[in-house]
Amino acid sequence: MDNFVSFEHVSKIFNAGSINQNVIFSDFNLSISKGSFVSVVGSNGSGKTTMLNLLCGSLPVDTGMIKVGGTDVTKLKEHQRSAFLGRVYQDPSAGTCPNLTILENMALADNKGKSYFLQRGVNRKRINDFKEKLSLLKMGLEDKLEQRVSTLSGGQRQALALLIAAETDLDLLILDEHTAALDPNSAATVMELTKRVVEEKHVTTLMVTHNLKFAADYGDRLFMMHRGNIVYDISGETKKQVSIRDLTDKFDEISIEDGN
Amino acid sequence: MQIFLGLLEVVLREGFIYGIMAMGVYITYKVLNFPDLSVDGTFPLGCCLAAELITKGMNPWISCLICLAAGGAAGALTGVLHVKLRITDLMSGILVMTALYSVNMVVTEKKAILSIFNMPTIFNSGIGGKLYGMFGQWGWAVMAGIVCLAVKLILDMYLETRSGLLLRAAGNNPKFVVSIGKDPGNMKILGLMIGNALTALSGCVLAQQRESADAGSGTGMVVMSLAAVIIGSAVLGKAKYIRSTTTAVIGMIVYRACLTIAMQLGLETIYLKALMSILFVIALISSRYNDERRKKNG
């Protein structure tokens, strides 16, 4: 399928009609093919995060349509869209439940899409699977199953959040500046893990990042957003050869236009 | 000594009975992070409904189940007002509490106090009757303890189920619940139903033990339960293998003991509600102080 994810004539205005009116998108169009790993860059206020929020249903669109896998998802609520997508947030505490243990977090996510009634919350038979998945992180978390997530470091939590987001089958992985709050080492580890998850699952991935190195090094397509439009869009060989230098030059060009 | 033992029985009995409500409030306040004021209305709802049903000849245990359901319905109403109609959490509770005044009056057929005369209750018939025969007044404390323990065990089991885990997640991080495809709002409604069902049950058991119901008995129930939850976690917060449900009940027993001591020292009943508020403030401030100290010590 060529456009697995598509935005069609989407508009979004914050505080419409007031003095603070802020037009984020007017007639925004985008299509992403199945299985691609897309990096999105752009300055603050360019609409990157709003785009993700519209796609995930955290914000409603004003007009236009969003499709995933050919189906119109515009009217679906956020939790309904979670059925086919996984999202990792910038804030490491957003993707997990800090007061629950690692095991409870994984067990909850393991049942995504199933019913949540009076079945036993933690299926003991799955523990070995969980341990195996955690051991891939090489963070020693497999021995800390009974520990509360609040006791983990930011990097560990984010790695766990990524595992949890991709625990069940999903069509779309949304990464919302998911390395921005981490130290350089943890960020690199989480990024490597991201690559592995994406390759294993062949899942269509949309990654918003401020880290131009990651944007250049990972993914098979890259686009830059500015004032609610896509101003630079590369894929294939061009994407493979792009350097951070090219991206910073492009960034500067836009910034000059903007007068800062 | 005789007097002391008598008082100890009263403290334990009332601690267990109100402890059922404390566990309910633990669910709304601690698990869901929802300051639920409808409790002040659902407690007398349980009292009045129990007295009315039992007077009409209803089996006392079935009366308990009906009170659970009625409390659950009131909790659902609070939840719907908050989640679906987007009224603030405090206001939703106040609205339901206020409306329940009228409901309770309808239930008691406009009587402020309703007495149960010579009808079987869980305390004077069946097991309760036998316990009373064996231990006298202490039979009441034992019976209240049995009901409280049963509720605690069921609640503990529930919190380990998938639904229970999801409930805890909904209070802890609603975004996480969304990310696994569930609506945290619905879990909030469910939690409020559980909390208020237990509160009504607590009122129902109290009415059966006292053999009378007071439609005005709700004032201060929120304050009392919150204080119990806070005292419990302050006293036993560090103990690893004690569950929070137990902590809430123990907090309630400590709280009832404080009230009883104050009364024994000669405090007039009219000052009781003021004392309840003061105890709450002390509990809240000392727990905050405790937290800060714990943070400093790493």
Image (cartoon, coloured by chain):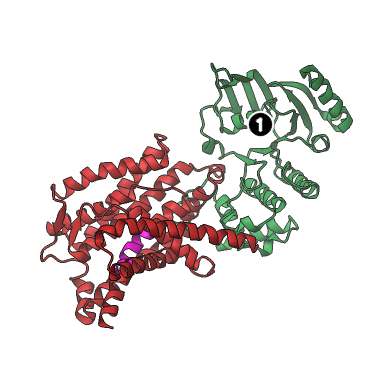
Chain colours: A green, B red
* Chain under numbered label 1: A
State the SS at label 1.
Answer: helix
Q: Position of residue A91 (x, y in %)?
A: 65, 43
Taking depth in this image into account, of B124 and A256 the one nearest to the observer is A256
Give the residue number, with chain letter if any, for mark 1: A49
Q: Whole-percent x and y of residue A9?
A: 62, 18
Query: Which stretch appears magenta?
Result: B13-22
Q: Residues within 10 Å of mark 1 (few under 14, many from 20)?
A: some
Position of B104 relative to A234 (above/below): below
Helix, strand or loop: magenta stretch: helix
Q: Is residue B268 left or right of residue B88?
A: left
Residue closest to the eye, B115 or B81: B115
At label 1, which amino acid type do we have? Answer: Thr
Quarter of the view holding residue B238: bottom right
Q: Residue B133's quadrant in the figure? A: bottom left
Q: Is residue A111 magenta?
A: no
- Magenta-drawn stretch contains B14: yes
Q: Quadrant of the C terminus of chain B?
A: bottom right
Left of A86 or right of it: where is A33? right
Give the quarter of the image for residue B249.
bottom left
Whole-percent x and y of residue A31?
Answer: 68, 25
- The reply to whether residue B158 is visible in this rendering is no
Give the quadrant of the N terminus of chain B: bottom left
Residue A141 sits above or below residue B81 on the image: below
